[in-house]
Amino acid sequence: MLLLIVLLPYALAVWQWQRGQDKEALLRSLTNAMSTAPVALVYRDAEPPPEFTRVRLIQAEPAGPVIELRNSYLAGQSGRRILQPWRQGPDRSLVLLDLGWLVDGVNLPTFSPQQIQPQGYRMPTPHHFVLSGAVKGFAGPVDQVDEAALRSHYPGHWFQGVVVLETSPDPLLHWPVVPEFLPDKHYAYAVQWLLLGVCLSGLWWLLWRRRHEIH
């Protein structure tokens, strides 16, 4: 049991270091995407996961009402991420647009398609940790997006993930694509866990030595 306690900080250090490397790779992808011109969103039969590319929709129009994803926190405030299915391109393929974030207590206005600049970054679909009784759906206020029901209700070729708009219409705020928890923090936690592991290893060695000296 004592050995497991000693080894646990090393395992956590490796985990935090790996998370730091993952965030570093994400930041590199986002930095590269931000420095390149947006590319047209074109559906492929073997649709890959979102790769954080900068894209623009062509011949785009809303396919249905918005989804208000509740319990979305920005700068410590509770609000909703406003998502909406859109059709685009000659094949009328579908993608979920992240229009932006709206603080709780503020009514959501109705946006015309002309107010939306359909250009942004491909990101994974937002997921929350939800408890039993949470509302899952594909329209209106929800706690979790029901992706299966969404795709069933709007048949067609669907892109994975969402496109987070570069510019959100007022009064929405742009949802940040750069993670708040940067790689340096993960690396710092990894070093802290490593130091704790070294301290526990030293303590374990002293206890082991004292026990053998007594015997």
Image: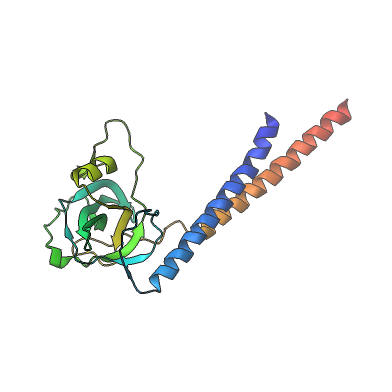
Q: Is residue 88 above or below residue 206?
A: below
Residue 174 falls left or right of residue 29: left
Q: Is residue 59 above or below residue 93?
A: below
Residue 163 falls left or right of residue 116: right
- Residue 127's x, y, as percent? 34, 45
The N terminus - image quarter = top right
Query: Which image quarter: residue 204?
Result: top right
- Residue 171's x, y, as percent? 18, 62
Residue at 15% in and 51% down: 64
- Residue 120's x, y, as percent? 30, 65
Q: Nearer the viewer, residue 95 or 185?
A: 95
The C terminus - image quarter = top right
Residue at 78% in and 38% down: 205
Q: Nearer the viewer, residue 43 or 25?
A: 43
According to the image, what is the colour scheme of the structure? rainbow
Residue at 80% in and 33% down: 208
- Residue 166's x, y, as percent? 29, 66
Q: Nearer the viewer, residue 99 or 62?
A: 62
Query: Which image quarter: residue 101?
Result: bottom left
Residue at 11% in and 57% down: 110
